[in-house]
């Protein structure tokens, strides 16, 4: 695998790694996502022994299984060509200052939270600013970053399943009643014949 002169990403969550890759590519930064089971230390030693270029930066999830990130950061500090390492925390909430200080004391360049998908625009800008600072305060191209963020938001929204609500029943719907059977009215009675009188008597 070719990791020379690239930003290496190791993260268990595929989506988190893909978001990082898109953000970095928006700035023309080449990156590669490695399986989290890779022997990263061995890969770096092989590159160094072959006198090949090393990665420019490592984005490393803090809680990878069977991987002691604290020891790795400490080892990297003693490496003949130290590579900056940004650790990615296991949670999306803001990183506690004490946790960040511990990570930096162990040799990490910084400790960032995972991307919160509900506020991806803010998260992307914040993460990229940290990367730019660690890489020597490189310039951020805002227009390509904005385009990247808009694409990310569309992709995230398209990937969500929205429940379809059942049709609402209006409370003003009149109650339907069965028709009342009509009863035929009796025919009108024939008018009584008019009586006439002759000399005071009816006839």
Image (cartoon, rainbow, N blue to C red):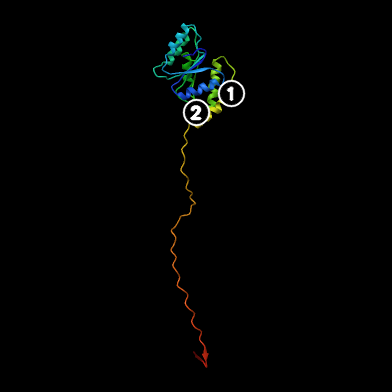
Residue placed most toward the observer, 9 or 188 = 188
Question: Would residue 95 be seen by someone viewing this image from the given angle?
Answer: no
Residue 117, which numbered label?
Answer: 2
In the image, residue 150 sits, relative to residue 100, either above or below, namely: below
Residue drawn at the location 57% of the way across and 24% of the way down:
145
Residue 55, which numbered label?
Answer: none
Residues at circles 1 and 2 in contact by the CB criterion of under 8 Å: no
Residue placed most toward the observer, 48 or 131 = 48
Q: Nearer the viewer, mark 1 or mark 2?
A: 1
Residue placed most toward the observer, 7 or 68 = 7
Residue drawn at the location 49% of the way across and 23% of the way down:
18
Residue drawn at the location 47% of the way across and 16% of the way down:
103
Q: CA distance from mark 1 to mark 2?
A: 20 Å
Query: Which residue is farthest bottom?
Result: 199
Question: Would residue 30 be seen by someone viewing this image from the given angle?
Answer: yes
- First-in-chain label (1 vs 2): 2
Could you say where residue 27 lies in the image, as x and y percent from the top left? 57, 20
In the image, residue 183 sits, relative to residue 143, either above or below, namely: below
Could you say where residue 124 lies in the image, as x and y percent from the top left? 53, 24
- Secondary structure at numbered mark 2: helix
Label 1: which residue?
Answer: 144
- Secondary structure at numbered mark 1: helix
The image quadrant that residue 90 belongs to is top left
Could you say where residue 195 lies in the image, as x and y percent from the top left? 50, 86
Residue drawn at the location 47% of the way across and 9% of the way down:
47
Categorize mark 2 by other alpha carbons within 10 Å: few (<14), some (14-19), many (20+).
some
Could you say where residue 16 lies in the image, as x and y percent from the top left? 48, 24
Categorize mark 1 by other alpha carbons within 10 Å: few (<14), some (14-19), many (20+).
some
Residue placed most toward the observer, 175 or 1 = 1
């Amino acid at each position: 695998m070719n990791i020379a002169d690239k930003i290496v990403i190791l993260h268990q969550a595929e989506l988190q790694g893909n978001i990082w890759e898109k953000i970095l590519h928006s700035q023309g930064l080449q990156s590669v996502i490695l399986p989290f089971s890779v022997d990263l230390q061995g890969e770096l030693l092989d590159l160094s022994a072959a006198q090949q270029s090393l990665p420019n930066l490592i984005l490393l999830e803090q809680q990878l299984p069977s991987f002691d990130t604290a020891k790795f950061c400490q080892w990297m500090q003693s490496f003949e060509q130290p590579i900056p390492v940004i650790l990615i925390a296991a949670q999306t909430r803001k990183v506690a200052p004490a946790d960040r200080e511990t990570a930096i004391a162990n040799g990490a360049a910084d400790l960032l939270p995972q991307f919160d998908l509900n506020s991806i625009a803010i998260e992307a800008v914040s993460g990229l600013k940290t990367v730019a600072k660690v890489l020597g305060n490189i310039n951020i191209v805002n227009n390509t970053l904005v385009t990247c963020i808009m694409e990310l938001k569309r992709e995230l929204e398209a990937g969500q399943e929205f429940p379809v609500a059942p049709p609402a029943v209006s409370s003003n719907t009149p109650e339907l009643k069965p028709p009342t059977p009509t009863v035929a009215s009796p025919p009108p009675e024939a008018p009584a014949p008019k009586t006439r009188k002759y000399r005071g008597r009816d006839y």
